[in-house]
Each structure stands twice: as structure tokens, then as C-alpha cells.
Amino acid sequence: MLEQRIQQQFFDSADLKYAAAEPLSKSIAEAVEAVLGSITAGGKVLACGNGGSAADAQHFAAELVGRFERERPGLAAIALTTDTSILTAIGNDYDFASIYSKQVQALGQPGDVLIAISTSGNSANVLAAAEAAHAKDMTVVALTGRTGGRLGELLTDTDVHIAVPHDRTARIQEVHLLALHCLCDAVDFQLLGDQE
């Protein structure tokens, strides 16, 4: 019984990934162009999210600054989720909803990209970060679940929305990680060409 339940998790995850491959490939490609356009023009990527999405933001920044699967110079990326002194100071002095927007205001520049990750699309601090990014003339790449919530509604024509067609948080996060890996792979492919 327990093994069948575990196997079903694998099957459900695989089914969603197959179903999402075609509808998400266009938006992931658009995200690649946004990230590449920013980085090659001297800009940077800022990333944020909460919980598992915070871990995804850190994972993505690490793949850009360090490397993904191939050697290359580091690419400019900052996870806004990692500095506990900044996070607790802003949370204490202002409120938790401001922990990312204050960093975007301080660190973001026109032409930068914000990777905004929220499975529901309704995380107040991610919404505030997206609004701050727009005020800085940055592109927002939003990773959400099915409807995109309020974050989806905030996006403009120059933003990118990677909306996983599912309602369950675990499945959405699994596809978010795959989408971020696709983004890393495609950035490297665009910069370095095919692997030998």
C-alpha cells in the first residue's frame, strides 16, 4: 500500500511534466531571452519566493553565479532570500511584506530581471517585489500555479508568466524546478552553443 502511494507520486509528477512541456516551453523560452538580454547588457537577475520557492530562488541564483552543467564565467544573480540580517531588519522595522521589495528598490536597476516565485501567485512579499521591479523598469518572470493569482494580474506585456497547469503545491514546485533547470540549460546553450 505504501509503495503504491509512493509510486503514484512519481506517476502524477511525470504526467504533469509531460502535460506541461508544450504549453510552458514558449514562456520558458521568453524567460531565457529576458535573462540573457539583461545579463549580456550588464544587468543582473534577482530572485525571491517563500518556503520551497525561496529554496528554488537560491538554487537558481547558485546555478547562474556558479555553473549549471558546463564551465562558464559566473552570471550576475542574487537570491533575495538569503541575508538574514536584511530580512529580519526589514521584517522588524517595516513588515514581512516588504522584505523583498526593499531589496529590489536598493539593488535593482532598469533592465534587470526579477524571478518572482509563488505557487499561489498571492504571496504579499512577492507581489510587492514585482511592483517594485516594475517601478525600476525591470522585467518580471513569474513562476506560479494554474491561475497565477494576483501576481498573474500584475504582469505587463513585457513580463513573462510561467504558470504551471496544476493546483497542488508539490506538483507545481516540481515543475518550477524543472523550468528553472530548463532556463539554466538554455542560457548556457545560447551563450556556449551545443555541447561537444
Image (cartoon, rainbow, N blue to C red):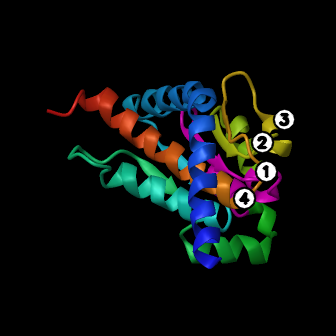
Amino acid type of disc 4? Thr
Q: What is the CA distance from the residue labelled 2 to the residue labelled 1?
A: 6 Å
Earlier sequence position, callout 3 versus callout 1: 3
Amino acid type of disc 1? Asp
- Which residue sits furthest front? 1
Is 136 included in the stretch rendered in magenta?
Answer: no
The stretch in magenta equals 99-126
Quickly name the residue at label 3. 153
Mark in front: 2 vs 3: 2
181 relative to 188 in the view: left or right: right
Location of residue 63 in the rendering, given as x and y in whole percent from the top left corner: 38, 53
Quickly name the residue at label 1. 167
Amino acid type of disc 3? Glu
30 relative to 147 in the view: left or right: left
Q: Are marks 4 and 2 in contact (CB under 8 Å)?
A: no
Q: What is the CA distance from the residue labelled 4 to the residue labelled 2?
A: 10 Å
Mark in front: 3 vs 4: 4
Q: Crowding near pointer 2: few (<14 within 10 Å), some, many (20+)?
A: some
